[in-house]
Image: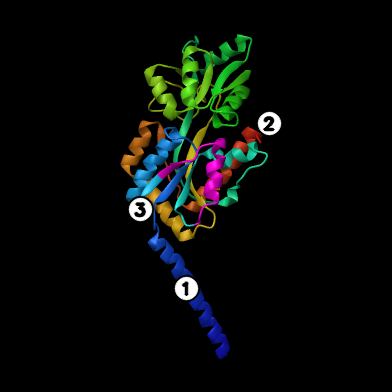
Amino acid sequence: MASLHRRHWLGALAALAAFSVVHAQAQSFPTRPIVIVVPYAAGGPTDITARRLAEALAKSLSATVVVENRPGAATTLAAAYVARSPKDGHTLLMAPGTTTSINPYLYRSLNYKFEDFAPVSQVSRQGFAITASPTLQVKNLQEFVAWAKAKGSPVTYGTTGTGSMTNILGEWIGRTLGIAVTEVPYKGTSQILPDLISGRIDMSVDGFASAIPFQTSGKVKVLGVMTEERSPKMPDVGTTRESGYPVLLAYTNFGLLAPAGTPADVIDKLHRGVVAAASSPEFQNVLAAGGEQARSSPSPQQFGEFLRSEYVHWGTIVKPLNIKLD
Protein backbone atom coordinates (compact mmCIF):
# COMPACT_ATOMS: atom_id res chain seq x y z
CA MET A 1 0.00 0.00 0.00
CA ALA A 2 2.82 2.38 0.89
CA SER A 3 4.41 1.58 -2.46
CA LEU A 4 1.16 2.46 -4.26
CA HIS A 5 0.92 5.76 -2.39
CA ARG A 6 4.54 6.51 -3.19
CA ARG A 7 4.01 5.83 -6.93
CA HIS A 8 0.87 7.98 -6.87
CA TRP A 9 2.72 10.93 -5.35
CA LEU A 10 5.70 10.50 -7.68
CA GLY A 11 3.34 10.52 -10.66
CA ALA A 12 1.57 13.61 -9.37
CA LEU A 13 4.88 15.38 -8.83
CA ALA A 14 6.04 14.48 -12.34
CA ALA A 15 2.81 15.82 -13.82
CA LEU A 16 3.14 19.00 -11.76
CA ALA A 17 6.73 19.43 -12.89
CA ALA A 18 5.73 19.01 -16.55
CA PHE A 19 2.92 21.54 -16.12
CA SER A 20 5.31 23.96 -14.43
CA VAL A 21 7.77 23.72 -17.33
CA VAL A 22 5.07 24.37 -19.93
CA HIS A 23 3.57 27.18 -17.83
CA ALA A 24 7.01 28.72 -17.40
CA GLN A 25 7.57 28.58 -21.18
CA ALA A 26 4.33 30.46 -21.83
CA GLN A 27 5.00 32.94 -19.02
CA SER A 28 8.48 33.75 -20.29
CA PHE A 29 7.56 33.68 -24.00
CA PRO A 30 8.82 35.44 -25.99
CA THR A 31 12.45 35.41 -24.92
CA ARG A 32 13.70 36.94 -28.17
CA PRO A 33 12.17 38.69 -31.21
CA ILE A 34 9.29 36.88 -32.91
CA VAL A 35 9.91 36.46 -36.64
CA ILE A 36 6.99 36.39 -39.07
CA VAL A 37 8.22 34.74 -42.26
CA VAL A 38 6.53 36.02 -45.43
CA PRO A 39 6.68 33.68 -48.44
CA TYR A 40 6.79 36.56 -50.93
CA ALA A 41 9.05 39.50 -51.71
CA ALA A 42 8.75 42.75 -49.80
CA GLY A 43 6.10 45.20 -50.96
CA GLY A 44 3.39 42.74 -52.00
CA PRO A 45 -0.06 42.36 -50.37
CA THR A 46 1.02 39.51 -48.05
CA ASP A 47 4.11 41.41 -46.94
CA ILE A 48 2.14 44.59 -46.28
CA THR A 49 -0.43 42.74 -44.18
CA ALA A 50 2.32 40.91 -42.27
CA ARG A 51 4.05 44.18 -41.41
CA ARG A 52 0.80 45.70 -40.19
CA LEU A 53 0.23 42.59 -38.09
CA ALA A 54 3.79 42.73 -36.71
CA GLU A 55 3.18 46.27 -35.45
CA ALA A 56 -0.14 45.34 -33.84
CA LEU A 57 1.18 42.07 -32.42
CA ALA A 58 4.17 43.83 -30.90
CA LYS A 59 1.77 46.02 -28.94
CA SER A 60 -0.56 43.22 -27.86
CA LEU A 61 2.31 40.93 -26.77
CA SER A 62 4.66 43.69 -25.55
CA ALA A 63 7.34 42.09 -27.69
CA THR A 64 9.60 42.74 -30.64
CA VAL A 65 8.07 41.33 -33.84
CA VAL A 66 9.92 41.48 -37.15
CA VAL A 67 9.15 40.36 -40.70
CA GLU A 68 11.50 38.22 -42.78
CA ASN A 69 10.90 37.69 -46.50
CA ARG A 70 11.67 34.26 -47.97
CA PRO A 71 10.12 34.31 -51.44
CA GLY A 72 10.16 31.56 -54.02
CA ALA A 73 8.54 28.37 -55.29
CA ALA A 74 4.93 29.40 -54.62
CA THR A 75 5.43 29.77 -50.82
CA THR A 76 6.99 26.29 -50.44
CA LEU A 77 10.48 27.54 -49.52
CA ALA A 78 9.19 29.65 -46.63
CA ALA A 79 6.74 26.96 -45.52
CA ALA A 80 9.43 24.29 -45.35
CA TYR A 81 11.75 26.66 -43.48
CA VAL A 82 9.17 27.41 -40.78
CA ALA A 83 8.11 23.77 -40.52
CA ARG A 84 11.71 22.87 -39.63
CA SER A 85 12.32 25.82 -37.28
CA PRO A 86 12.60 25.43 -33.48
CA LYS A 87 9.26 24.54 -31.92
CA ASP A 88 9.17 27.48 -29.54
CA GLY A 89 6.81 30.00 -31.16
CA HIS A 90 9.50 32.48 -32.18
CA THR A 91 9.30 31.64 -35.91
CA LEU A 92 5.89 31.90 -37.58
CA LEU A 93 4.63 31.66 -41.14
CA MET A 94 2.34 34.30 -42.60
CA ALA A 95 0.51 31.81 -44.77
CA PRO A 96 -1.86 32.63 -47.60
CA GLY A 97 -4.50 30.02 -48.33
CA THR A 98 -2.47 28.60 -51.22
CA THR A 99 0.12 27.14 -48.83
CA THR A 100 -2.20 24.58 -47.25
CA SER A 101 -5.26 24.61 -49.54
CA ILE A 102 -3.85 24.55 -53.08
CA ASN A 103 -0.16 23.57 -53.16
CA PRO A 104 -0.84 19.99 -52.00
CA TYR A 105 -2.91 19.46 -55.18
CA LEU A 106 -0.32 21.02 -57.50
CA TYR A 107 3.06 19.63 -56.49
CA ARG A 108 4.03 16.05 -57.23
CA SER A 109 6.54 16.23 -54.38
CA LEU A 110 5.86 18.83 -51.68
CA ASN A 111 8.59 19.60 -49.12
CA TYR A 112 6.11 20.02 -46.24
CA LYS A 113 2.72 18.73 -45.15
CA PHE A 114 -0.19 20.14 -43.20
CA GLU A 115 0.77 18.14 -40.11
CA ASP A 116 4.10 20.01 -39.98
CA PHE A 117 2.28 23.08 -38.64
CA ALA A 118 0.41 24.16 -35.53
CA PRO A 119 -2.38 26.59 -36.53
CA VAL A 120 -2.45 29.83 -34.53
CA SER A 121 -5.18 32.02 -36.00
CA GLN A 122 -6.61 33.54 -39.11
CA VAL A 123 -5.46 37.14 -39.51
CA SER A 124 -7.39 38.56 -42.44
CA ARG A 125 -9.41 37.90 -45.57
CA GLN A 126 -9.27 39.57 -48.98
CA GLY A 127 -11.55 39.16 -51.96
CA PHE A 128 -10.63 38.93 -55.65
CA ALA A 129 -11.75 40.99 -58.62
CA ILE A 130 -11.84 40.27 -62.35
CA THR A 131 -10.09 43.09 -64.18
CA ALA A 132 -9.88 43.86 -67.89
CA SER A 133 -7.88 46.07 -70.20
CA PRO A 134 -9.33 49.58 -70.61
CA THR A 135 -8.96 49.09 -74.37
CA LEU A 136 -11.85 46.60 -74.38
CA GLN A 137 -15.24 47.99 -75.27
CA VAL A 138 -17.04 46.31 -72.36
CA LYS A 139 -18.42 47.73 -69.12
CA ASN A 140 -19.23 44.66 -67.04
CA LEU A 141 -18.77 40.90 -66.78
CA GLN A 142 -21.78 40.04 -68.94
CA GLU A 143 -20.56 42.23 -71.79
CA PHE A 144 -17.09 40.75 -71.41
CA VAL A 145 -18.44 37.19 -71.76
CA ALA A 146 -20.32 38.15 -74.93
CA TRP A 147 -17.18 39.81 -76.34
CA ALA A 148 -14.98 36.82 -75.43
CA LYS A 149 -17.32 34.30 -77.08
CA ALA A 150 -17.39 36.37 -80.28
CA LYS A 151 -13.63 36.97 -80.24
CA GLY A 152 -12.66 33.88 -82.22
CA SER A 153 -9.44 33.32 -80.23
CA PRO A 154 -8.65 32.65 -76.56
CA VAL A 155 -8.78 35.44 -74.02
CA THR A 156 -5.30 36.16 -72.67
CA TYR A 157 -4.93 36.64 -68.93
CA GLY A 158 -1.92 37.60 -66.85
CA THR A 159 -0.77 35.59 -63.84
CA THR A 160 1.99 35.73 -61.24
CA GLY A 161 3.13 32.29 -62.41
CA THR A 162 1.77 28.88 -63.30
CA GLY A 163 0.22 27.30 -60.23
CA SER A 164 -0.32 30.66 -58.53
CA MET A 165 -3.72 31.68 -57.20
CA THR A 166 -4.11 34.01 -60.20
CA ASN A 167 -3.53 31.06 -62.53
CA ILE A 168 -6.00 28.83 -60.66
CA LEU A 169 -8.65 31.55 -60.66
CA GLY A 170 -8.07 32.47 -64.31
CA GLU A 171 -8.58 28.89 -65.48
CA TRP A 172 -11.59 28.42 -63.19
CA ILE A 173 -13.16 31.65 -64.45
CA GLY A 174 -12.65 30.57 -68.06
CA ARG A 175 -14.35 27.23 -67.45
CA THR A 176 -17.22 28.76 -65.51
CA LEU A 177 -17.85 31.53 -68.05
CA GLY A 178 -17.55 29.08 -70.94
CA ILE A 179 -14.75 30.96 -72.68
CA ALA A 180 -11.34 29.85 -73.93
CA VAL A 181 -8.41 31.38 -72.01
CA THR A 182 -4.63 31.39 -72.36
CA GLU A 183 -2.29 32.09 -69.46
CA VAL A 184 0.48 34.69 -69.81
CA PRO A 185 2.79 34.29 -66.77
CA TYR A 186 4.68 37.20 -65.24
CA LYS A 187 7.03 37.58 -62.28
CA GLY A 188 4.59 39.76 -60.35
CA THR A 189 1.55 42.00 -60.42
CA SER A 190 3.66 45.07 -61.22
CA GLN A 191 4.74 43.43 -64.49
CA ILE A 192 1.16 42.51 -65.45
CA LEU A 193 -0.27 46.03 -65.16
CA PRO A 194 1.55 47.73 -68.09
CA ASP A 195 0.52 44.98 -70.50
CA LEU A 196 -3.06 45.03 -69.21
CA ILE A 197 -3.29 48.82 -69.59
CA SER A 198 -1.90 48.72 -73.14
CA GLY A 199 -4.13 45.84 -74.21
CA ARG A 200 -1.35 43.29 -74.79
CA ILE A 201 -3.35 41.00 -72.52
CA ASP A 202 -7.12 41.04 -72.09
CA MET A 203 -7.72 40.38 -68.40
CA SER A 204 -6.28 39.45 -65.03
CA VAL A 205 -7.49 38.48 -61.57
CA ASP A 206 -6.39 40.71 -58.71
CA GLY A 207 -6.80 40.86 -54.96
CA PHE A 208 -8.72 43.88 -53.73
CA ALA A 209 -5.49 45.48 -52.53
CA SER A 210 -4.43 45.83 -56.18
CA ALA A 211 -7.85 46.13 -57.85
CA ILE A 212 -9.10 49.05 -55.76
CA PRO A 213 -6.35 51.54 -56.70
CA PHE A 214 -6.54 50.34 -60.33
CA GLN A 215 -10.27 51.05 -60.37
CA THR A 216 -9.91 54.38 -58.56
CA SER A 217 -7.25 55.61 -60.97
CA GLY A 218 -9.14 54.36 -64.00
CA LYS A 219 -6.12 52.44 -65.25
CA VAL A 220 -8.08 49.20 -65.70
CA LYS A 221 -11.70 48.10 -65.77
CA VAL A 222 -12.95 46.03 -62.85
CA LEU A 223 -15.66 43.82 -64.36
CA GLY A 224 -16.84 42.12 -61.18
CA VAL A 225 -15.90 41.20 -57.64
CA MET A 226 -15.77 37.55 -56.56
CA THR A 227 -17.37 38.20 -53.16
CA GLU A 228 -20.83 37.83 -51.64
CA GLU A 229 -21.31 41.59 -51.46
CA ARG A 230 -20.01 44.61 -53.35
CA SER A 231 -16.87 46.22 -52.03
CA PRO A 232 -17.44 49.52 -50.18
CA LYS A 233 -14.34 50.76 -52.00
CA MET A 234 -15.84 49.86 -55.43
CA PRO A 235 -19.60 50.25 -54.89
CA ASP A 236 -20.34 50.60 -58.60
CA VAL A 237 -18.83 47.21 -59.45
CA GLY A 238 -21.26 44.31 -59.37
CA THR A 239 -20.59 40.90 -57.86
CA THR A 240 -20.20 37.73 -59.89
CA ARG A 241 -23.44 36.56 -58.30
CA GLU A 242 -25.26 39.61 -59.67
CA SER A 243 -23.84 38.82 -63.11
CA GLY A 244 -25.31 35.32 -63.01
CA TYR A 245 -22.26 33.35 -61.82
CA PRO A 246 -22.87 32.70 -58.10
CA VAL A 247 -20.29 29.89 -57.95
CA LEU A 248 -17.45 32.32 -58.66
CA LEU A 249 -16.62 33.26 -55.08
CA ALA A 250 -12.98 33.53 -54.05
CA TYR A 251 -11.02 34.90 -51.12
CA THR A 252 -7.47 34.56 -49.97
CA ASN A 253 -7.20 33.97 -46.23
CA PHE A 254 -4.04 34.95 -44.39
CA GLY A 255 -3.15 33.22 -41.15
CA LEU A 256 -0.31 32.44 -38.77
CA LEU A 257 1.21 28.96 -38.53
CA ALA A 258 3.86 27.76 -36.09
CA PRO A 259 5.97 24.60 -36.29
CA ALA A 260 4.09 21.51 -35.10
CA GLY A 261 5.08 20.62 -31.56
CA THR A 262 5.11 24.22 -30.33
CA PRO A 263 3.79 24.15 -26.73
CA ALA A 264 0.03 24.63 -26.52
CA ASP A 265 0.38 27.46 -23.98
CA VAL A 266 2.65 29.35 -26.37
CA ILE A 267 0.18 28.82 -29.23
CA ASP A 268 -2.61 30.10 -26.98
CA LYS A 269 -0.60 33.18 -26.06
CA LEU A 270 0.09 33.91 -29.73
CA HIS A 271 -3.58 33.38 -30.51
CA ARG A 272 -4.62 35.87 -27.84
CA GLY A 273 -2.14 38.33 -29.30
CA VAL A 274 -3.64 37.99 -32.78
CA VAL A 275 -7.18 38.37 -31.41
CA ALA A 276 -6.17 41.57 -29.64
CA ALA A 277 -4.43 42.86 -32.77
CA ALA A 278 -7.30 42.00 -35.11
CA SER A 279 -9.87 43.61 -32.83
CA SER A 280 -8.06 46.93 -32.60
CA PRO A 281 -9.77 49.69 -34.65
CA GLU A 282 -6.38 50.89 -35.90
CA PHE A 283 -5.53 47.49 -37.42
CA GLN A 284 -9.03 47.06 -38.84
CA ASN A 285 -9.03 50.50 -40.44
CA VAL A 286 -5.60 50.11 -41.99
CA LEU A 287 -6.58 46.80 -43.59
CA ALA A 288 -10.01 48.08 -44.67
CA ALA A 289 -8.35 50.94 -46.54
CA GLY A 290 -6.83 48.31 -48.82
CA GLY A 291 -10.00 46.28 -49.19
CA GLU A 292 -8.99 43.67 -46.62
CA GLN A 293 -10.94 42.45 -43.59
CA ALA A 294 -9.25 41.83 -40.24
CA ARG A 295 -10.35 38.44 -38.89
CA SER A 296 -9.23 36.24 -36.02
CA SER A 297 -10.21 32.66 -35.24
CA PRO A 298 -12.20 31.75 -32.11
CA SER A 299 -9.42 29.28 -31.22
CA PRO A 300 -6.33 27.67 -32.76
CA GLN A 301 -8.33 24.44 -33.08
CA GLN A 302 -11.08 26.20 -35.03
CA PHE A 303 -8.49 27.73 -37.35
CA GLY A 304 -7.13 24.25 -38.03
CA GLU A 305 -10.64 23.02 -38.86
CA PHE A 306 -11.16 26.01 -41.15
CA LEU A 307 -7.93 25.24 -43.03
CA ARG A 308 -9.01 21.62 -43.52
CA SER A 309 -12.38 22.74 -44.90
CA GLU A 310 -10.61 25.16 -47.26
CA TYR A 311 -8.40 22.30 -48.47
CA VAL A 312 -11.49 20.26 -49.37
CA HIS A 313 -13.20 23.24 -51.01
CA TRP A 314 -10.27 24.17 -53.23
CA GLY A 315 -9.74 20.55 -54.18
CA THR A 316 -13.03 20.61 -56.07
CA ILE A 317 -11.71 23.56 -58.09
CA VAL A 318 -8.05 22.66 -58.56
CA LYS A 319 -8.20 18.94 -59.32
CA PRO A 320 -10.27 19.27 -62.54
CA LEU A 321 -7.69 21.76 -63.90
CA ASN A 322 -5.00 19.01 -63.97
CA ILE A 323 -2.15 21.41 -63.20
CA LYS A 324 0.92 19.53 -61.97
CA LEU A 325 4.23 21.03 -60.89
CA ASP A 326 7.54 19.39 -59.99
Separation of marks 3 and 1 at Cα, in angstroms = 26 Å
Q: Residue 233's quadrant in the figure?
A: top left
Q: Which residue is mark 1?
A: 17
State the SS at label 3: helix
Q: What residue appears at the point 34 percent right and 51 percent down from the top-left corner?
A: 60
How far from the left and from the top, in percent, is residue 235?
A: 39, 23
How far from the left and from the top, in percent, is residue 132?
A: 50, 17
Q: Which residue is mark 2?
A: 322
Give the residues in magenta.
67-87
State the SS at label 1: helix
15 vs 75, nearest the viewer = 75
Label 3–label 2 contact, CB within 8 A: no
The amino acid type of the residue labelled 1 equals Ala
296 vs 75, nearest the viewer = 75
Q: Residue furthest bottom?
A: 2
Q: Which residue is mark 3?
A: 61
Judged left or right of residue 210, residue 172 is right
Q: Earlier in the sequence, mark 3 or mark 2?
A: 3
State the SS at label 2: loop
